Amino acid sequence: MNAESETARDTEGHADGHRERPSAEVAVVVIGYDDAAHVTDAVRSALTQGPAVREVVAVDDCSRDGSVGLLERLSVSEPRLKVIRRRANSGGCGTPRNTGLDAVTSPYVMFLDSDDVLPPGAVDALLAAAEGAHAEVAGGLCVRRELPSGREVPWQPRLYALHAVVPRPAQRTRLVHDTLCVNKLYRTAFLRAHGIRFPEGRFPYEDVVFTARLLAAAPRIALIPDRVYVWHVRRSQARLSISLDRSGVENWRARTEACRQAYEVLLGAGQKELARTARAKFLDHDLRMYVRELGLRDAAYRRAWWDLTRAHLAEYDADDWARDPAAPGRLIGRVVLASPEPCDLPRLRELAARPARLNPPYARAADGTPVWSDAVPQVSLEPLRARPVRALPLAVDAELRPGARGTRLRLRLHELYGRVAQAGPETVNVEWRHRDDGDVVIHGATLTLAPCAGVPGADDTVGSSCTWSAETAVDLLALAAPGAGTWDLRLRIRFRDGASRDVTAHALTGAGLLRRRAVPSARHGVVLVQPYTTHSGALALRVAPGVRGVLSVVHARLRRLLH
């Protein structure tokens, strides 16, 4: 039987299993350190999953804030709860998870962090999927919930869009991208038989290595679209989580080391395709994320970061770079490798944006080959010529201008070595998307893109300065209607053949362009408007209507000054 028919058969089996009430076969390991404010909520979210949960093992990593007392009092009325207090703090998440895993007696195990929760029905859904497909691992959708706004962003939604069974991880290399350990149910005996554990001690990004060890053992995996984990993101906390606290270069050192070990684990197990995908994931995800934030760091950080990155990328071979050589992460990596000193950081930041933007100037070598810049000519951009227009890193500039007729948005699309003219841009759709609630969208006009004089044809060999432009009014009343908030600009460019490309716009930062302005409003009296540039260089807009909105801006500014 081929893999496709096997997958279809097991998906049906999963559906049948989902209708049955699972037996008490799951252990949930909850780890925490100095998190008395949240740990009991996490434990209760596991206990209230129902009879499928046989035991909850709460491992306290030697907290000093009374967390253990809260857990022990809860255990008096909850016989399924077992509390383990480590005598010394491990400095990481791996050791307490291993401690909990050693104490588990159930056939299946899950992991839960003290500041997150399991949504209702998560355990039932995962257990039914695992048993219905005879799988060693079942994974479901994790959502990142931004607090206090409550905005939710799905993690790796493509991977969990449908029910599926993967007989071997190599058949779905995208699994490498989901490095979370908490949105999955594991067969306990499988982990123990293959010695799959977390790195011990202070090892940030321990789940990256754990995931590699898991995939290296080639488990049968069931995937479901159900929400099974809520990852709480609290950016305002005094102590940020490891994944959020990227201010020190040691965080980057830890991430590169975890990615290096993951690659070696997969390669050592003979999983060459998964190992290659792990390296590609580093370029496409990790590298781009940190490059977007380089402008926030000081010179010492940037110097150390650049050296660490060059050392890591020097381990890559020709096959690693040959995969989609025009992809933004690979272009960024090649520029870093080619330059001993940090260079072109603003332009690299734009290329690291999502979606990517390759801003001018567009240099050429003496033979006419497109190159990164005159200073780094050894990085060829020739692969861009073969990239479909829907995947090109198109550069659009945006500026907001107040005037007698209201605030105007001006857009300018740049040529890219003749590829844009060849595709024939015709219109651009404008929309503003609310930062905290992505479902709230203000649709603007569909604008005609007017070419500048002398726009080149498809055989153009210069074309660096040619542009297409459009202009429209910004409806500030519509943006102010939901109250104070932040709006991100999103654009969709349509081309002659009907193809389209979704892009963001580079925020121009000339004199006065990003100054806060008070705009008179018949409805609100006044609307404060603050254009600004995001970490990735895109234009965004903060809007605060009325006296209450003005006071909220003043209070926020005072808090920042006092802090």
Image (cartoon, rainbow, N blue to C red):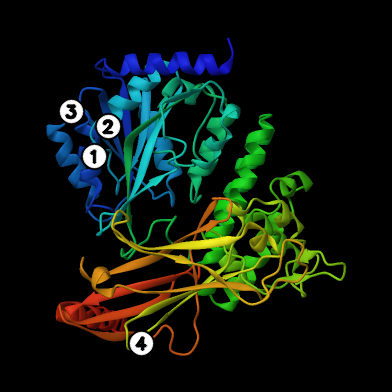
Q: Which residue is mark 1?
A: 43
Q: Residue 178: x percent and y percent?
A: 49, 40
Contact (CB < 8 A) between labels 3 and 1?
no
Regarding mark 4 in the picture, which secondary structure is present there? loop
Q: Name which residue type carries label 1.
A: Val
Query: Separation of disc 3 and disc 1 at Cα?
Result: 13 Å
Q: Which residue is mark 4?
A: 403
Say which label, 4 or 2, has the lower sequence index. Answer: 2
Instruction: Determine which quarter of the picture holds residue 551.
Output: bottom left
- Tell how many labels: 4
Q: Residues within 10 Å of mark 4 (few under 14, many from 20)?
A: few
Say which label, 3 or 1, has the lower sequence index. Answer: 1
Query: Separation of disc 2 and disc 3 at Cα?
Result: 9 Å
Observer-side mark, 2 or 3, equals: 2
Q: Name which residue type carries label 2.
A: Val
Left or right side of 479 for 72: left
Left or right side of 354 for 551: left
Left or right side of 367 for 259: left
- For the N terminus, give its image quadrant: top right
Query: Separation of disc 4 and disc 2 at Cα?
Result: 62 Å
Q: Which residue is mark 3?
A: 79
Contact (CB < 8 A) between labels 2 and 3?
no
Q: Which residue is mark 2?
A: 56
Q: Name which residue type carries label 3.
A: Pro
Observer-side mark, 3 or 1, equals: 1
Query: Separation of disc 3 and disc 4 at Cα?
Result: 69 Å
Say which label, 3 or 4, has the lower sequence index. Answer: 3
Observer-side mark, 4 or 2, equals: 4
